[in-house]
Amino acid sequence: MPRWPLLLLTLLLAPAAGAGPAADLYARARAATVEIIVDDHLDASGFLIDAAGLVITADHVIAQRYDTLEVRSPTLGRLPARVIAREARTAQAIVGQLLDYARPGVLRQAPVRLDEVAAAVAERLDGVVVTAEAVPEVRGDRHRLEQVLTNLASNGLAFGDTVRLTIGPATDASGASGVGVRVEDDGPGVPADACERVFEPFFTTRPDGTGLGLAIARSVAQAHGGTLRAWPGPGGRFELFVPTGAPEDTDG
């Protein structure tokens, strides 16, 4: 049976100056690399939930060590503590993304205006410019759809100062009517051979990426009966389609 290694998470802390508890903590945290071996018959959702549990455990251990360091070594200064706290927050963010992907939860569907959702994203993120035509309501989970657009816009802002969201009536490949949202940036774009791979869990082209954001975004789009596609560059371009007739509420 073919097996392939997946590097789930490596917790790296900046080396602390000198010796003592800080250096020991760094060595322990660096050693806390979790490598999961996945075979073709392993259930992906179960794997992710188990993996999230491992990360939560690792994060808890780091937090405990941080408390010990702070109490026993007050003369070490604040830099090691800040570094450890930052890495703990990063681990917690990854845990949240793992759980979002593994356990998408209930879609709380109601009439939603995607132009209003895009406007809310633009209010929260500097550099997001929205152009919207008159569009019908779709039936969906506003929070989860806003999560999708926030993720796409944030990805684009990592490559430039402006992200453009264009909303209008659209149809999908089957001819179903709905609303489309095009998200464009001025970055390098997605390579043609990676337009599908970018939606795979843990695949990322960014040094600071977790490889989970786009996987979550597509799963949310599909839960709404819609699609999320990437187009090759230059310039990043993603297209979200949500049909006007969405599936009934599900518990994901």
Image (cartoon, helix red, strand yellow):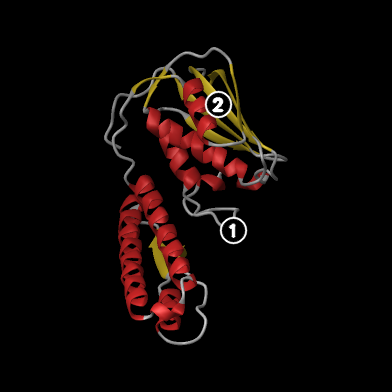
Q: Position of residue 78 (x, y in %)?
A: 46, 71
Q: Which residue is mark 2?
A: 181
The answer to whether 244 appears left or right of 71 in the picture is: right
Residue 186: mark in rendering:
none
Tell me which residue sits at (35%, 62%) in the image: 55
Q: Is residue 198 left or right of residue 225?
A: right
The extreme front residue here reads: 75
User: Which x, y percent locates residue 5?
Assistant: 46, 66
- x and y percent of residue 10 in the render? 46, 67
Within the image, what quadrant is residue 26 found in?
bottom left
Query: Which three-letter amino acid code belongs to the residue tagged 1?
Result: Pro
Name which residue lies at 56% across and 53% down.
Answer: 204
The mark total stands at: 2
The amino acid marked with disc number 2 is Val
What residue is rendered at 47% in x and 44% in y? 215
Q: What is the quadrant of residue 250 in the picture?
A: top left
Describe the element under mark 2 as helix, strand or loop: strand
Quarter of the picture containing the C terminus is top left
Residue 1 seen from this side: no
Please give the residue where the numbered disc 1 appears in the rendered image. 207
